[in-house]
């Protein structure tokens, strides 16, 4: 799956990441159909210390998606 990964200040890279397996009971797997860049993401990129952002975290939460799998309780 593709993911927008925070690398360091001012650097966001799209990476191919392994699809999650063995979802927990309270997790769902989404297929993203569309996504946008949020103002919070831009702030994280420009000043990560104000958000305590760690390198390697996947950014993005403004999306349209459909559920393709769910964890089992």
Image (cartoon, rainbow, N blue to C red):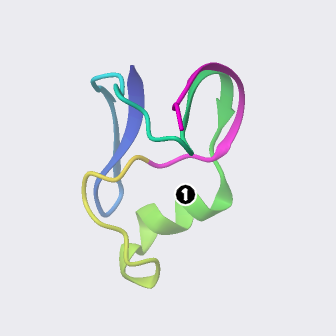
Q: Quadrant of residue 30?
A: top right
Q: Is residue 41 above or below residue 5?
A: below
Q: Which residue is mark 1?
A: 41
Q: Point out residue 50 in the picture as x, y percentages from the top left corner.
A: 45, 83
Judged by its main secondary structure, the magenta piece is strand
- Position of the N terminus by quadrant: top left
* Region rendered in magenta: 59-73
- Position of the C terminus by quadrant: top right
Q: Which residue is located at x 42 percent, y 75 percent?
A: 47
Left or right of 51? Residue 18 is left
10 Å crowding of disc 1: few (<14), some (14-19), many (20+) = some
Q: Residue furthest front?
A: 73
Q: Which residue is located at x 27 percent, y 23 percent?
A: 18
Q: Point out residue 56 in the picture as x, y percentages from the top left corner.
A: 26, 51
Figure disc tally:
1
Q: Which residue is located at x 29 percent, y 66 percent?
A: 54
Q: In the rendered structure, does residue 8 fall within the stretch colored magenta?
A: no
Q: In the rendered structure, does residue 60 fall within the stretch colored magenta?
A: yes
Q: Secondary structure at mark 1?
A: helix
Q: Quadrant of residue 65?
A: top right
Q: Point out residue 14 in the picture as x, y percentages from the top left corner.
A: 36, 30
Q: Which residue is located at x 55 percent, y 59 percent?
A: 42
Left or right of 24? Residue 41 is right
Left or right of 31? Residue 55 is left
Q: Point out residue 12 in the picture as x, y percentages from the top left corner.
A: 36, 45
């Amino acid at each position: 799956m593709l993911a927008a990964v925070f690398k360091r200040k001012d650097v966001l890279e799209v990476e191919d990441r392994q699809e999650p397996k063995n979802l927990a009971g309270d997790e769902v797997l989404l297929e993203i159909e569309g996504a946008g860049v949020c103002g919070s993401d831009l702030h994280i990129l420009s000043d990560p210390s104000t958000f305590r952002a760690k390198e390697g975290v996947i950014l993005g939460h403004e999306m349209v998606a459909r559920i393709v799998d769910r964890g089992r309780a």
